[in-house]
Image: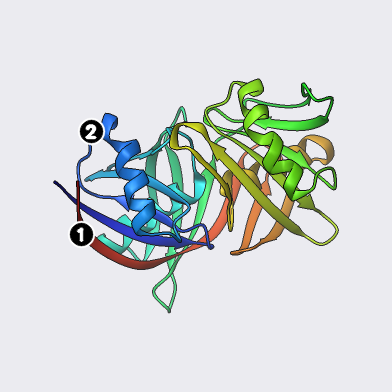
């Protein structure tokens, strides 16, 4: 039996389990699967190590996740009594640590702004089925921007194949309705075996900002997603800033077989 302590957090609806107990990398996928069975509302699992200024987060599938990075920083800020300030988090799928600026709110939640990694590339891809769509590639995940181009059913059917074609650790299809200001994010993580319509997606929102900035220049955009609103700012110097809100749900300790 493994004694596991974890925190369950809600970053703009993208509910996230952060495991605080040391867990060997080879045991993380199975532990993540068991925890997601225990917490059916969870959309992802990360494994957190926090030792002084060194905060490290490895997602169960080895992917990058901006909402989980924001959650890790918020959890550390709550534990340390930090009402405002910035922390740096090393995250799987990101070449460099990401900086998260935070401010505690009156209801106990934390508003965070993540300086997101810049994309490796933003370009159109021709997929094996003939679809031609823009793809924003980050080190740990690729996102396909689909503005009025796909139904939800079609997105679910093609995403695993498209992820393999892109040779990505993880991939998303972002169903964007710019006129309505909405985003529906579908994310596939092969190593974790998950294909999920997420309630919000930080890296996907950032991908939309990077794509629009490539076409139009600096962007400041709020996108309403099923779990709430995320704001992305693409500055003139190419920096990308993602703002959301993290709420602690609970902490628990369980024994896994």
In this picture, residue 193 sits left or right of residue 46:
right
Please tell me which residue lies in front, 86 or 207.
207
Residue at the image point whose x is 74% and y is 59% from the top: 182
- Count of labels shown? 2
Residue 47 position, x and y percent, is 31, 43
The local secondary structure at tag 1 comes to: strand
**Quarter occupied by residue 211:** top right
Q: Earlier in the sequence, mark 2 or mark 1?
A: 2
Residue carrying label 2: 24
Please tell me which residue lies in front, 221 or 67.
67
Dot 2 and dot 1 residues touching (CB under 8 Å) = no
- For marks 2 and 1, give the CA distance: 18 Å
Residue at the image point whose x is 36% and y is 60% from the top: 8
Residue 253 position, x and y percent, is 20, 59
Find residue 253 and name its label.
1
Residue 58 seen in the figure: yes
């Amino acid at each position: 039996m493994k004694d596991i302590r974890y925190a369950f957090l809600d970053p703009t609806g993208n509910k996230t389990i952060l495991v605080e107990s040391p867990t060997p990398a080879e045991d993380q996928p199975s532990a993540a699967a068991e925890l997601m069975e225990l917490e059916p509302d969870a959309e992802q699992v990360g494994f957190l190590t926090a030792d002084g200024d060194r905060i490290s987060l490895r997602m169960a599938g080895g992917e990058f996740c901006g909402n989980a990075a924001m959650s890790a920083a918020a959890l550390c800020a709550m534990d340390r009594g930090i009402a405002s300030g910035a922390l740096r988090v090393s995250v799987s799928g990101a070449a460099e640590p990401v900086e998260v600026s935070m401010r505690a709110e009156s209801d106990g939640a934390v508003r965070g702004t993540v300086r997101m990694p810049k994309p490796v590339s933003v370009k159109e891809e021709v997929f094996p089925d003939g679809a031609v769509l823009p793809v924003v590639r980050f080190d740990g995940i690729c996102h396909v921007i689909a503005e009025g181009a796909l139904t939800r059913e079609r997105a679910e059917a093609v995403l695993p194949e498209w992820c393999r074609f892109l040779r990505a650790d993880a991939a998303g299809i972002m169903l964007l309705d710019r006129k309505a200001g909405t985003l529906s994010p579908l994310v596939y993580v092969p190593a974790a075996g998950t294909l999920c319509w997420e309630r919000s997606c930080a890296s996907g929102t950032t991908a939309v900002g990077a794509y629009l900035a490539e076409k139009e220049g600096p962007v400041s955009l709020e996108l309403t997603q099923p779990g709430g609103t995320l704001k992305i700012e693409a500055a003139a110097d190419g920096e990308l800033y993602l703002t959301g809100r993290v709420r602690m749900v609970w902490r628990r300790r369980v024994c896994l077989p």
